[in-house]
Image: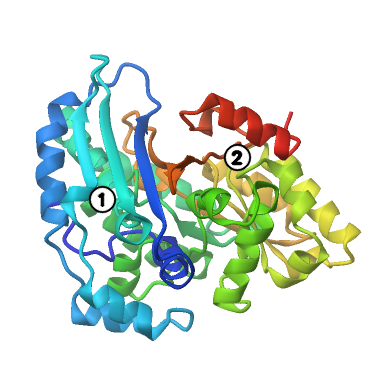
Amino acid sequence: MIIDSLLDTDLYKFTMMQVVLHHFPGAQVEYRFKCRNEGIDLRPYVGAIRDEVRHLCSVRFRDEELAYLRSMRFIKSDFVDFLGLFHMNEKYIVIEPSPKDDGDIDITIRGPWLHTILFEVPVLSIVNELYFRATVGKPDYAEGRRRLASKIDSIVGQPDLAGVRIADYGTRRRFSRVWHEEVLLECRERLGPIFAGTSNVHFAMKHGLTPLGTMAHEYLQACQALGPRLRDTQVFGFETWAREYRGDLGIALSDVYGMSAFLRDFDMYFCKLFDGARHDSGDPFQWAERLIAHYESNRVDPKTKTLVFSDALTFPLMAELYRRFRERTRIAFGIGTNLTNDLGYPSLQIVIKMVRCNGQPVAKISDTPAKNMCEDEAYVKYLRQVFQIQ
């Protein structure tokens, strides 16, 4: 089966899940699947996806996995105790062919946030791997290795790129679990200290890599329904995060309402409290320029903060960003699909996004419109008005 460890997911799922346990244990949510590619027929794989998800729901955390989580300084013992009793429940997920008869499939995850939050990443990994198994036949691993070697060669030995730090963020859209592991081992071997680690907790544990991650969009989206009032959503989310982690895990996500709204809320207090911010939509050069200027206007030295880039990165783009900003701030990069699913085949652009929390719609309005996902247009319009988004 594709998933045989509940650690085979991104670290930020656990960091967010701990916040849910301690602050929002009663929250009810709904997630929906979307494939952004045109002309992809995923219906033939519905049965296989269900079988894989059924197996996923039979997997439990092993003692050594719980011990590994417990060893992390920011993971609390009561959360690990909870995970020792936890398993995913098949009753919370429905997988069906779309009634639109357009090749799409409908995957709906609905239930307590605490018991559904871990579905997203492994389910996306399952859909990806089943699709490529069926459509590729015999994978051209030689071409994948050639492409990976070319990327690594473009970095290694370049004096002006010696300070680059690259992390793997590619679990959800990887070509396969086997290929993902090979890529990680090759990066560790050839990149050395340039390779900062991986978001995948299972491979971090297995291979002695650093697990990386803080928060995702769903956390700040859910705060739209959980906070005191809508306009204070980001402030409420960041303050709750700070109460939980007391200065640890200090990279803030900046694009749930667009950069302008983020900067309005990310005041001097947050500038000093958080270690930096993560870019995930819009022009990365403009984003970095605006964030650096924002730090300076709040009397914070940008050289003490970290800017994390994670949106559709390629190695050439990463090198360009690093060369432009390396003297002005700390820079880190999280590369996903371009690292773990580049064997020469068109990749799937699939996502699972939270669309409701406690019965009300939630949404993000990022700086890349194609990334927006909400079923309630009236709510999106209201959200734009509240956060002064054009």
19 or 147: nearer the viewer: 19
Dividing the picture into quadrants, the one containing residue 12 is bottom left
Amino acid, disc 2: Ser
Q: Is residue 324 visible?
A: no
Amino acid, disc 1: Trp
Mark earlier in primary sequence (2, 1): 1
324 relative position to 140: left or right: right
Residue ID at (13%, 26%)? 44
Q: How far across and down, in percent of the image, does residue 141 sit?
A: 24, 42
The colour scheme of the drawn protein is rainbow
Residue ID at (26%, 50%)? 179
Q: How far across and down, in percent of the image, does residue 297 sit?
A: 90, 58
**Which residue has dot 1 on it?**
179
SS at circle 1: helix
Residue ID at (24%, 22%)? 98
Q: Is residue 193 above or below residue 32?
A: below
Q: Quadrant of the C terminus?
A: top right
Mark 2: few, some, or many residues within 10 Å (few <14, many ≥20)? many
Q: How far across and down, in percent of the image, does residue 92 sit?
A: 23, 49
**Which residue has dot 2 on it?**
281
Dividing the picture into quadrants, the one containing residue 383 is top right
Q: Nearer the viewer, mark 2 or mark 1?
A: 2
